[in-house]
Amino acid sequence: MIRRDIDWRSPLDAFAPLAGEPHAFLLQAGEAARDPGWAILAAFPEAVLTAREGTAFLGGARLDEAPFAALKKLAAARRLSDGAETGAPFSTGLVGYIGYEMGGALEPAGAGPASPFDLADMAFGAYDAAALFDRKSRRAFILARTQIAAERLKEALGVAAVAAPEPLGGVGGVGSNFDAGAYRQAVAGVIELIRAGALFQANLAQQLTVEDVVSPYEVFQRLMQGDAAFGACLQYPEGTIVSNSPERFFSLTPLGDAMRLLAEPIKGTRARGENAAEDARLAAELLADPKERAENVMIADLTRNDLSRVCRDGSIREEAICELSTLASVHHLVSRISGVLNPGLGPVDVIEALFPCGSITGAPKIEAMKTIAEVEKTGRGPYCGAIGYLDDRGGADFSVAIRTMIIEGRRATVPVGGGVTLRSDPQAEYRETLVKARAMLGALGVDANVIAQAGAT
């Protein structure tokens, strides 16, 4: 492994010259995040693996293997026996996303409509060089498998500081595939299915749309002024995925001679208060709410069962259940479930066992997926899938692709949803989607309250 120290600069500044470059990406926490951690930047992949409608392609050539089998094969071919001890979570490897529709490949009974986007159902670039930025110690370096890859990436990085984006002007039309009344009615319909015993919970989403948006890079700049734990800007020829997810899907990290598997599902949301007293009251209300706690415990149980499919017997631990997590615009309840991965298994085995994440489907998972398909009547694309990496040393880290927008041309789609249970109130569920959309819409120059009056598009 080649290491090349580089001058410190903001990861966003370094990424600026690569804005619009297909397959260039930046993963980083928001500027106000409690743990800014590492930022990861790369471009110019050696190969690109994609999947569309169940078929895998490598460099555009159709493969005989199914998509996840092809992903496992590519990851195995790149595996390094050792790597540089840099403290960074990533060296080189596969970076990309898995769209929600890929869940149908794993659970055919839960398959739904095709993705409405031009983006592939899954895409991973194989990167032989990456720039790593330690935002705590303000040091930066490139790790690479070859000198050529290291030099190409170094030459592409920006050096000078980039000015903050100008105030946004007006945008074009805004709307949703559900108006407020239709969304409330859909929630009520799911409640009736739960009352009839068909399922316990389903995550229902609406897709907000904004026309005439500015460049995806500028949108990402604005979004990263917040406190997202898992910011991402992934650029492709068909469009760009911009995300500020608060939720980890799973991570794999070394634990002696084994690998520790950690999942952190989020369920339960309250808006932040206007002042300290109101904020504290809302946080306490969330912690004590029986509906929100039941929703979180239900998904934590589903996650524990999913982890047990790939972890050593007796290794599953509930490290936290219904713990309060406070972000800039919302309070959340988060649980942490961990286990020790069975010998001989790797990140793709984990994906196959856990995907799609239970927090964005519901329980039981397959029945919830069927309900989502029937009620939403459209695919989700990257939303509610996963964004992250498979490191060439064997580790992995993926966020759940919530608080995520898809920008194709000058149109941004901002899907937002929430878990519906027997105790749900349709109007409260609708308001919760707008609370979750607030930061993303703000980055696009839209007041979330405008959407509330917008009709179906």
Image (cartoon, rainbow, N blue to C red):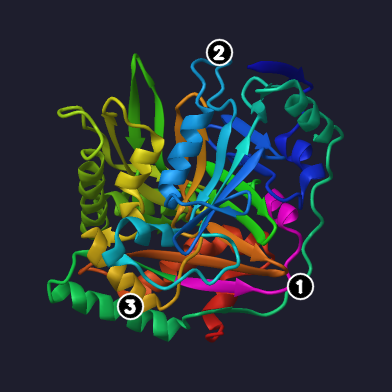
Q: Nearer the viewer, residue 444 or 428?
A: 444
Query: Which residue is depicted at the point 67% across and 66% down?
Result: 408
Crowdedness of circle 3 by 10 Å Cα count: few (<14), some, many (20+)?
few
| Magenta region | 206-222
Instruction: Pick the quarter of the image with the N terminus.
Output: top right
Residue highlighted by disc 1: 170
- Left or right, 327 with reference to 242: left
**Label 3 or label 1, whichever comes before in sequence order:** 1
Q: Amino acid at mark 1?
A: Gly
Could you say where residue 10 lies in the image, as x and y percent from the top left? 74, 33
In this rendering, the answer to whether 261 lies above or below 116 is above
**Label 3 or label 2, whichever comes before in sequence order:** 2
Disc 2 to disc 1, how far (Cα)? 48 Å
| Residue depth check, mark 2 versus mark 1: number of the one nearer the observer | 2
Could you say where residue 70 lies in the image, as x and y percent from the top left? 46, 45
Judged from this view, the residue extending furthest toward the left is 197
